[in-house]
Structures are given as structure tokens and as C-alpha cells.
Amino acid sequence: IFHLVMDERNTPMRTYQVCNVMEANQNNWLRTRHISREGAQRVYIEIKFTLRDCNSLPGVPGTCKETFNMYYYESNNANLWFIKESQYVKIDTIAADESFTQVDVGDRVMKLNTEVRDISNLSKKGFYLAFQDLGACIALVSVRVFYKKCPLTVLNLAQFPDTITGGDTALVEVHGVCVNASEEFEPPKMYCSADGGWLVPIGRCVCKPGFEENKDICQPCRPGTYKASATDAYCTKCPPHSSSPQEQAVECICEKGYYRADTDPRSMACTRPPSAPENPITTVNETCVTLEWSPPRDTGGRGDITYSLHCRKCSGDGRKCAPCGSSIHFVPRQFGLASATVLVTDLQPDSNYSFTIESQNGVSDLSPTPRGSVVINVTTSQTVSVVLKERRSKDSVTLAWQGPERPNGVIVEYEVIYYEKNQREQNYTVLKTRSNMMTVDGLKPGTTYVFRVRARTDGGYGSYGGEIELETNVLAIGDPNQSTILAVSIAGGIVLLIFLVTCFVVSVKLPGSRTYIHPHTYEDPNQAVRDFAKEIDASNIRIERVIGAGEFGEVCSGRLRVQGKREIYVAIKSLKAGYSDTQRRDFLSEASIMGQFDHPNIIRLEGVVTKCKPVMIITEFMENGSLDTFLKKHDGQFTVIQLVGMLRGIASGMKYLSDMSYVHRDLAARNILVNSNLVCKVSDFGLSRVLEDDPEAAYTTRGGKIPIRWTAPEAIAYRKFTSASDVWSYGIVMWEVISYGERPYWEMSNQDVIKAIDEGYRLPAPMDCPVVLHQSDRPKFGQIVTILDKLIRNPASLRELANSSCALYLSREDAPTPDFSVSTVDEWLEAIKMGQYKENFSSAGYVSLDSVLYISVSELAKMGVNLAGHQKKILSSVQSLQTQGTHVQV
Ligand code: AMP
């Protein structure tokens, strides 16, 4: 029935009403017209309605309902006039929520409820919505159908179009298009999340040469500036001696007389050829001459000056000159000399030469003007003519000689060189004198020597005269041998070796009592097991059920009878038959590691069975299994304080491990176990195999398997696993916990995760995440425990949520809600209309309000609160107790 009523502002409000509560067997339907889905895969339906409490209707029979059903039917046909009941797909059963706004209707108060549901994976043109009433008293006030879009946006110079959010696969990958005058640096992409926000930007565009970035566009470089490469960030001023008269310059043009070499970067000043070399000097040495000069006064603005030489041989009067030809040589070379000196060899004695020294640099070839050069003339000297006389004794020889006829300067001295015949290479002696005669003493008797003589003038040395062989008399003695030296060096080596060994012994760190000992430091791995794990008699173990599968065999639950104590529940991991020695050792290594730990948040080792088969590891039993599966199973069912309590436990276990210098390497929710009291314990210890058997671990380019999503970047890049990298993994675990087991980085590929992290992207705060829990620091585990403890003691600090997109889901917090004070469990239960459970609470020991603050779903179930709706109502009220003290929202 279509009704017109007045809302709180007295404006007419149309509603569809049904209220056949007095009659049985109701089945009333209300259907919408065809609603086009406009390409959206997920559509949200917000309904506002009022629902009468059956209790408030006097004398209604038991058939009175407080719910109605919502359905949809997908169709390409927009004009269906009849749809069969069986064709509809049910969306949900809708009940009145405990939160509401009040609407005065005449003298009655209407409770207006708002509920949002979604339907996903739509594929046809549109759908019909339908409402089924089975005997309730309902007024449907509004139905709002909408979908969410990620709005058109420009990021990193890439434009991302208006994108409709996805269906069940939460993220839509969108490729960006580079804005005008830009090009791809790395393909830009982002993900459009289910709630209409853009996530994880990767890649970017860059402005083309001649353009620079300004806000979200590329604008041309102004005159006088340029940008040569797309990867340069901004246009820069033209370098010296260049200019750019027009906009959009990709380079600046050189001034007249200045040039830019091909290899010069565009950012370098324009340059010009150098001036001529200066102050050349020569030093003649027989038929060689060394030329030296000073660099040009003007280098042209460059550092790449080289020199080239040209040689001409001239007639005696210096008038006629001709190129020297290939018989003379330049050391190190004739052209492209880097230093201002060269040695010219194989000149002819007693001749005139003219050398031209040219300077050039990287732009000389671009300039039409001739190279700067300087010319120097050289005359080579004559040889000492002949040795005139000689005199011999058994140990000395006397020589006399004639000087050169036309020396090229004043003779400064003579040089006598001699050596034993046939031993020139090993040993020759040089003596000098100013006179034309010399006596050479100290010679060996009975030995033949070779002598040569040359003159030196102020222009350099002349050439040697011919060789003279002379022999003395009597016999000689040999050299001392070198065996002593060898003996000394061997002794030295031994001393060094001893020194090294000493250092090594001293630097080995002796493990302290609180440091974890790696089982591999034991020569016999069985000894490590004996040292750290208690041997259990297999007859004391009763295996009951298989609860999981491990790398080495089944994991079972069962009971262990311990002498003098009652039976305890245990988990039993066994090593499957047909194992190798290495497998047995690796399997037991987990026990020898676990056995070293003793902490309430580390899985406790009860012992091992190694004396008979199968080999087993017995640990305490964790009723709720691994944390990731547990959270997924109980999505949304815990209070923030409970979640933070779990995180606190994990941090405390990790602090203990890091204090023991144990690095876990594979901290993830799947490797945390949960017991019936919601206590979380770190598990999965072992050696290399820990990562080998983790299905999340992927091979990296550097070899080795790493669970990418949980691992710190430095550990992925160069295997730097430390307690600090464990803290990174802990951050990921926090995210997993707060998001109830969501997969970190959703369905992004490992490669995209690595890239995104590298570019500074971090996981956003999950829905309903307290602001204080979402920070991107890497504290020590000790600090984390302290921070979490503070938050638990002051729950109000957890109230502000990080994620504003949660506002939709939390809107009821904004609604004015009546609250009143309660001081006992009974009052509280009454206030939230759960009074029927007063008995259950008091007999389970919950007598004070404080004691219910940390209650869990499983505890509620144990005390007999089994209806999911009631559990939810109680837990959400517990949450408000935590955040608002004893003011209860009803
Ligand atoms: P694991 O080989 O240690 O990864 O164990 C395989 C699976 O067995 C785990 O994912 C858990 O579900 C289960 N499991 C292992 N240890 C325990 C335990 N102490 N208590 C309960 N379940 C366990």
C-alpha cells in the first residue's frame, strides 16, 4: 500500500507500507522497475525503512515477523511485467538495526533504519529489485541504488579515467595515459579499489624535451632556457656562450666563434679552440731531443687540449727546410699528445731541425680558423771522436780522448761508461770528468771490460764514440747465495700465520646464556636435539585427529600424559616414512630451535620422540589453529581491543626472539597459532626449509625463496635478514590482523609489490583501523610492546579511525543515540535488551563490568550465547564499553 506520511520537518514523505500482522501466511511482494546497471559490476542498495516491534503491537499472534527479504533479478529485458518468485536471487534478510534516527509522525515516533547491501558480479543490462514481506509491519521510505567510481585523476603526469569499481575481484587495474607533451618513463598504472579510491600508483610519465612539469601539465621551456632530455626534471638556463631565442628549446645555440663538440653534454658552455702553446725549450741528448712547452694561455674553456708536432730538417744555413720523413720517432707519439712534452729520437747528428708545436681541443675541427702553433729550431751535436790512449794494470785502466770538432755549445763535461763484456744488462758504471782523461780503478783482474765516452754541452749530450775493449789480469770470487733471505722470509710467514690464528680464536664470540644457538653449530645435530628437547616415551602419547599437513608429514592433535600431571592436549608433528638423513635432521632442527625458547607467546615444545618410529615433535595444542584462517573465519567479530591484544602477544614473542638474537624470516599470520583464549604464539621455526615449504615464498632473482609480501625490501634485495626485517614482517601481520586476514597487497603480482614498495607505496590503513595503529616507522619490538600496552590501557586512543572511507559503514556513530549509565553486568545486559543471558554471564564468572571487556565470541558460545545476532550485539556493546566507559549505547 502506498502511503503519504509527514517526516520530522512536516514535509510529505511517501512510503510503501504493509502491516498484515494479524493474519497468517503472508507473502507480499513489492518490485522496482528495471534498473540499468550502467556498466557497474557491483551495485549498492541503501534502504530506509521502519519496522514495528511485534511486542509493541498489542495482541498480535506469534506469526508476526520483524524482518523482510530483499531480492534481485538480473535481466537484459527492461520491460518484464512478471517475474516468478523462484527466479529471484536473495540479497539478504533485513532486520531493524539497533541504531536508528527518530522521526515524529503525528503523535507516533517512527524508528527510521538505514541498511546498505551490495550485489556484485552483475553482467546483464540491468536488474529488478524486489521486497518480500512475510507478515511484518514495515514502511519502506526510500531505496537508493548506486555504484562507486574512482574519479578521473591525473597523477605523475598520467591521466586515469573515471573508472567504475570492480565486482568481486576487489581491484581494477587501470593504465594511465600520458598528458600532453609528456611520454612514458615507466608505464603508469593504478588500481581502483572497491570503495572508489585509487591505490598503489606505479610508473610515471615525464615531460618531453623542451617541456617541464608544472602541476599536472607539461609547459614549454621559456626563451633563454632549455631541456634536453625527457628525464631532466626542469628547464634550465642556457649555459655560457649560448642562447635559446624561442620557447620549447631542447638545446641552446652557440654564440658566433663558439662551438659544441658532438660529445659535449647540452648543459656544457659553448667553447672555442685554444691559443698557441708558449715558451718551447729543447734538451738535446746525442741524436735525441726533448721538447717542452707551456700550455696555451687561453684554453678556449675546455680541458681536452692536445698537441701535435710537425718536423722539418733544414740546411746548414737554415734557409731550406723539408719534411723529416718517417725515419725519426716521437715518444710517446707525434699527434694528440696530452702532456706538454715529447721526446724525438733517431735524429741525425750534427743537423738542423725545425719543429712546429700545434695546440688543439675538442672544437678545433669545427672552427675555420687555423690552429695556434709555435716553432722551435734544434741543432744535434757531434760525437766524441776517438780514444787516443790507454794504459792497463791488474785492477785499473786509464783512457784519454779527443773532444768533438764542432760542439753545439760549451762542453760542460765528459761521461765514461763501462761494463764487463757480455754483462751489459746487469751492471754498468757511469763516471764523469771535466778533463779529456780518466783512470778507472777497482776492476776485477783477468776480466775484459767495454768502455765508451761522450760529451755534454749546455744543449745536451752528444753521441758516444766507438766501443773499446780492454782486459785486466788474475782470478775472481762468486756472489753470496740467497738462501739466508729465503729462510728469513719463511720464518716470517710462520709468525704471521700464528698471529692470524690468534686473532681468529679471540674474535669467535662465545654464546651468552640468553643467545639462541643455531643447531648447525653442533657437529652432531642429534646432540642439539638431546640438549634442547626432552625425549618422550611414545606410550604416553595418544593421537586423536589429523589437523593439518606439514612439510614432513601430518600434524595431529592428541593427548600427552606427563608424569605427576594431568593429561594435556598436544599437537603432534610426525616425520613420514622413507625420509632421508637430511630430512630427519631438518625436521628435528625445528625442535632444537623451539626447545631453546620459553615464552608465553612462543609455541612451547613438550618434547620429541626419536627413539622409535615415527619420529615426532610434540608441542602445546593451539585450539584455534593458524591466525590467518582463524581471522577469516571470524571476520568482523572481535573488538579492537581484542585485535590489539593479539598483536601485543605477537610483538612480545618477537621481542623475546630478537633479544635472543633469533631472526625468524617468515613472520606472517599463517605462521602464528591461536589458542582457545585468543593467545597468539609465534611458530614455524626451522632452518632453510622454513622458507622452502612456505607456499607464499617465491624465488627471487638472487636465488633463494622469499615470501615477498611479508619481507623487508633490504632482505629481498640482498638477503639482509635481521630483527629489523622481522619488524617489517610484523607490520604486515598487523595489517593482516586488523583487516581480518585480507591478503597483503591483494591480488597484485609479486613484481608489482616490489616495484610499488620501492617507489614508496605502503599498505593503506585497513577498514576500521585506529589511526594510532597505522604509522610507517620501524620501531624495535620492545618499543612496539610498550606502545601497544599503552593503547590497551587507554582504549579511547583507539577510537579515531584512520580510514575516512569507513564513514559510510560507521555513519550510525554520527546519529544521535540515547545512552545511559550502567554499573553492573546485569544492568548492562538489560540496557542492551539481552537480559535473558544474565544467568549465563554470572555462572560463567563474569560478575563485574571490567571482566566482560575482553570477552570473545568463542567464550560467548561456550556460555550458551549461540545466536550470531545476539553475539554481535553483545560484542559491539563491549566495544563501546571499552571506548566510552559505562555509557552504553542502545
Ligand atoms: P606447520 O607444518 O607447522 O606449518 O603446521 C601445519 C598446520 O598444522 C598449521 O597450519 C596448523 O593449522 C596446524 N598446526 C601446527 N601446529 C599446531 C599446534 N601446535 N596446534 C594446532 N594446530 C597446529
Image: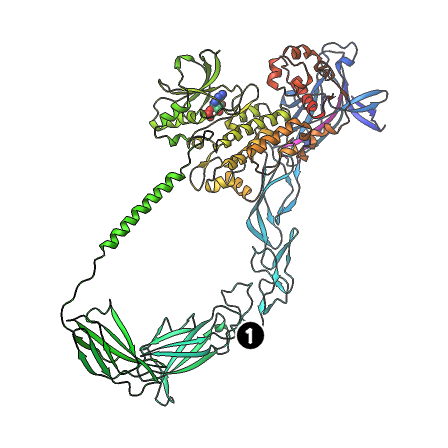
What secondary structure characterizes most of the magenta part?
strand
Write the residue at 32% across / 86% down: 407
Q: Residues within 10 Å of mark 1 (few under 14, many from 20)?
A: some
Whole-percent x and y of residue 552? 40, 25
| Front in this rendered view, residue 285 or 712 | 285
Q: Quadrant of the C terminus?
A: top right
In the image, what residue type sits under mark 1?
A: Gly
- Whether residue 856 can be seen here: yes
User: Quadrant of the rendered structure where residue 347 is?
Assistant: bottom left
Position of 57 with respect to 723 (left or right) is right
Farthest residue toward the left?
Answer: 474
Position of 246 with respect to 324 (left or right) is right
| Front in this rendered view, residue 299 or 458 | 458
- Whether residue 147 can be seen here: no
**Residue 456 position (above or below residue 734):** below
Q: Magenta part of the protein: which range?
A: 36-50
**Residue 885 position (above or below residue 370):** above
Write the residue at 47% across / 29% down: 514
Q: Quadrant of the N terminus?
A: top right
Look at mark 1 in the image and give the residue it sits on: 257
**Mark 1 Cβ inside 8 Å of ligand 1:** no
Whole-percent x and y of residue 340? 43, 73
The question of residue 44 being in magenta is answered with yes
| Front in this rendered view, residue 48 or 402 | 402
User: Quadrant of the rendered structure where residue 618 is?
Assistant: top left
Whole-percent x and y of residue 765? 62, 35
